[in-house]
Image (cartoon, rainbow, N blue to C red):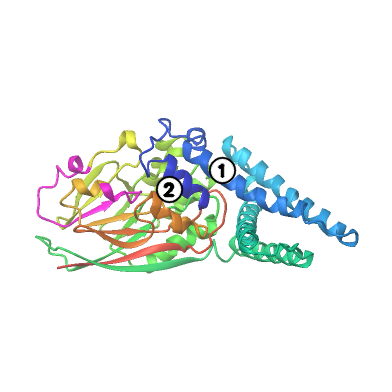
Amino acid sequence: MIIDFFAGALGAGAIEIPEPLIPDAASMHFSIGWIITFAVILLVNLISPFHYIRAQFKHHLRAVHIGLVVFHFALAVPFVIYFVNFFAGHSKEPYMATLMYFAGFYLVYMFYAGTLYLFWDIGRFALRLFSKKRKREPKFRKYSVLITSIILAFSVAAAGTSLIFPHHISITDYDVTLDKRDSTLSSMKAVFISDSHIGSAVRAREIDEIVSDTMALNPDIILFGGDIFDEGTSDYLKEYTSKAFSKLSAKYGVYFILGNHDDYTGDTEAVLSYFEKAGIEVLLNDTILIDDEFYLIGREDHPSRRNDLPDLEKSITKDLPVILLDHKPLVRELKKSDLVELQISGHTHDGQIYPASWVTPTFISLNYGLHKYGDTQIIVSSGVGGYAVPVRLGSPAEIVEIGITFQ
């Protein structure tokens, strides 16, 4: 989402700013990225109450004026409570499951309302600057802009936090061709799942849907790209996920790599244990030869534990296709590799809340979709869930199906 995108981009290694050394919730929330992110959100969110207060309704509409101000601050209360508790590490408390919907609604509502007002103010300033006649703005125009922005922002926020957009999981198809080399494979179907952030938009019902949808695709290999859990995932949902994921199976196996938020849980070993109990193979800077047909590299995400690609490729002894599973699509590191033909990543959420996807490429060179870097093809998924609040707008919650042809 907007929060996770900026914070991840600025504070989690997407650009050259060091990541906090301690991978827990506290270190993440007080990184440079988070400070900048919430400063921007706070400034945008102050625009709307400023307009509410200066609206100057006449006496017979004074109740509307007061109602708007009360409405804003009433929405702000659960937002503040939620994120204070979130930052303090109380994400797993039962009351947080309800508060996150109010927090998500408020975040989207105020962001869009504030953005609409910002454009209005810029346009009004431009008109005053270039207009020869300085006319006082008609009050009906102020009221109409005020009411329109409220209705539009309210509608968008309601849609984004509804049971439709954040909970609808789609299947996104890609077809890629890799150099066959000495492999005898002609084709393979891979299913990629990442960034579920179980506990917000993805809960028990969606976990079951992920499993059933994945198996319905009849995959040859299943790949988890990290951030399946985060600091808000309850122990109950971790256990539920482990049992549900134990039903997953594929010809060439099921594999998992860590994302940055799997580390932010504060107990990375516990996260790994849930996947191991489910019979899923965990790759921690590992290069494995699968069925003597192709190599799969799974990289660690945390900088202090992350091996360079040349080190991971040392064990490659046969002339076979190489697939890289890496949480972040940091393509600059592909300069060091001559072997990787396909990289599969997540992390970006495609911004999660529109229009964050416009800005993502500024911090991470690849945001979403199928790309090519030299001889390497890169697929970046928007993920199947949402971070911190159950909101998705203009970004699909997806399971990725990859048809791989070997020629």
Residue at (20, 42) in percent of width and height = 312
For the residue pair 311 and 370, the one nearer the viewer reads as: 370
What residue is shown with label 1? 38
**Number of numbered discs:** 2
For the residue pair 306 and 188, the one nearer the viewer reads as: 306
* Rendered location of residue 347, percent (x, y): 40, 51
In this rendering, does residue 223 appear at all? Answer: yes
* Rendered location of residue 317, percent (x, y): 10, 48
Q: Does the CB distance between marks 2 and 1 fall below 8 Å?
A: no
In this rendering, does residue 384 appear at all? Answer: no
Q: Could you tell which of marks 2 and 1 lies nearer the N-terminus?
A: 1
Q: Give the range drawn in magenta.
A: 309-332
* Rendered location of residue 18, percent (x, y): 38, 35
* Residue 39 appears left or right of 397: right
For the residue pair 111 and 160, the one nearer the viewer reads as: 111
What residue is shown with label 2? 227
Residue at (64, 64) in percent of width and height = 131
